[in-house]
Amino acid sequence: MIVEKDKIVSIQYNATDETGAVVDSNTEFEPLAYLHGHGNILQSLEEALEGLQIAEEKKVTLTPGEAYGDFNPELVFEVSREQFPEGAEQVQLGTMVQSSDGQELLITDIDGDKIVLDGNHPLAGRTLHFSVTIKNIRQPTEEELSHGHVHDAHTHNNSCGDGCGCH
């Protein structure tokens, strides 16, 4: 079996940035299983894995445009502390908060009553180097295929519930 659209693919990976710093890895955990061809991982990474077989390894470099986009300075802005609920514990450097429209924002600086928020993905603007090993490939269930993602004991106890978003 090969990595192709509509197959469940399990991978072990290590991702570093241009400085060699590890930015993500699952080498110490269970392999990540995803439904290939359904946008469950970065599209450029998915395309690079196409055609591989179990136990094959591949090194893939993704530019910012292929990964999480270029850093957009317009997504970094300052707000007043009074815009947060009184006594809000979430006002701490490095904390992710959610805007009123649901956007995830990172608190990058706090200077008295001024708080700087960044709406960029934390890996935006970075070139990423992936080292990937294909651990398993299998056919999806009809439910997985119709929902567009893997169902397993860790995600749905083999069936979708209220938190799945499938229904």
Image: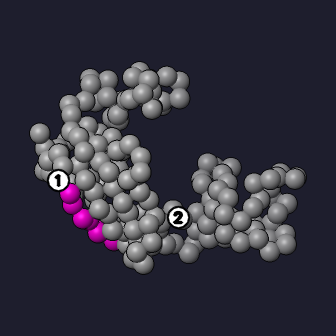
Name the outermost residue toward the front: 28
Disc 1: which residue: 56
- Amino acid marked by disc 1: Glu
Q: Residues within 10 Å of mark 1 (few under 14, many from 20)?
A: few
Tell me residue 92's x, y (percent): 75, 61
Q: Quadrant of residue 4?
A: top left
Name the amino acid type tagged 2: Pro
Question: Percent from the top left, x then y, of residue 86?
Answer: 88, 52
Q: Kindly give the residue lying farthest to the right in the view shown.
A: 86
Residue at 41 percent across and 46 percent down: it is: 29
Check residue 122 in the rendering and tell me which mark sits there, or answer none: 2
Residues 2 and 101: in front is 2
Q: Position of residue 30 (x, y in %)?
A: 38, 43
Task: Locate residue 37: give its quadrant.
Answer: top left
64 falls in the magenta region: yes
Image point (82%, 63%), residue name? 81
Label 2 or label 1, whichever lies nearer to me, is: 1
Decide: is 167 above or below 18: above
Q: Which residues are magenta?
A: 56-66
Tell me if 99 is positioned left or right of 3 in this view. Answer: right
Q: Is residue 4 left or right of residue 21?
A: left
Residue 110's spot in the image, x, y percent?
A: 76, 71
Q: Quadrant of the C terminus?
A: top left
